Amino acid sequence: MTEPKLKDAQILTLIPQRPPMVMVDAFYGIEDGVSRSGLTVADGNIFCKGGRLREPGIVEHIAQSAAARVGYIFTQRGEQVPLGFIGSVDKLTISHLPKVGSQMQTEISVLQEMGGLSLISAKTEDNDGTVAECRMKIFLKID
């Protein structure tokens, strides 16, 4: 991993979620159309149970990684960050549940965009390998 462009509280400029629902703590930027974000799994995370990040937390991390990508693009253009909503999650595979202390990194690639609708592909990894992969449809509320 490289150094993040934004981390910790700075992430709040990119996403609408607020503690305790923040599931991204680093944004590394966008290169060749692929954005990268991260999360260090903390013991106090509301999605942790038994020392591991549970499935809803992994999906929420992926969704917030996609939101951080959109937020970054809009802030770079000097525009207000729009709200986004998950329309669907497809082809979700979860290989393992990350342990507390794991550093996850997620790559988001846009497969299709049309108006306020995006189809993204996501891959999340940690020190133990691939955590999850999926596709999501995301709707943006653009005023």
Image: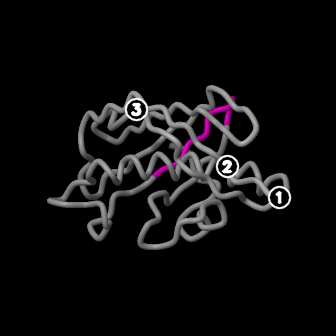
What residue does disc 1 label?
Answer: 79
Q: Is the residue marked by circle 1 packed among few (<14), some (14-19), or many (20+) residues within 10 Å?
A: few
Classify mark 1: helix, strand or loop: loop
Give, as a three-letter code, the residue at label 3: Glu
**C-alpha separation, residue under disc 1 versus residue under disc 2:** 14 Å
Residue 127 numbered mark, or none = none
Q: CA distance from mark 3 to mark 2?
A: 22 Å
Q: Residue at x 44, y 51 (%)?
A: 61
Q: Are marks 3 and 2 in contact (CB under 8 Å)?
A: no
The label shown at residue 133 is: 3
Mark 3 lies on a secondary structure that is strand
Amino acid type of the residue that numbered disc 1 sits on in the rendered structure: Glu
Disc with the residue nearer the chain's start (1 vs 2): 1
- Of the residues shown, which amino acid type is indicated by label 2? Leu
Spot occupied by residue 73 in the image (x, y as percentages of width and height):
74, 48
Extent of the magenta region: 31-38
Rendered view: 115 above or below 26: above
Q: Residue at x 50, y 48 (%)?
A: 63
Q: Is residue 88 left or right of residue 113?
A: left
Q: Is disc 3 surrounded by few (<14), some (14 to 19) or many (20+) residues within 10 Å? A: many
Q: Any magenta on residue 19?
A: no
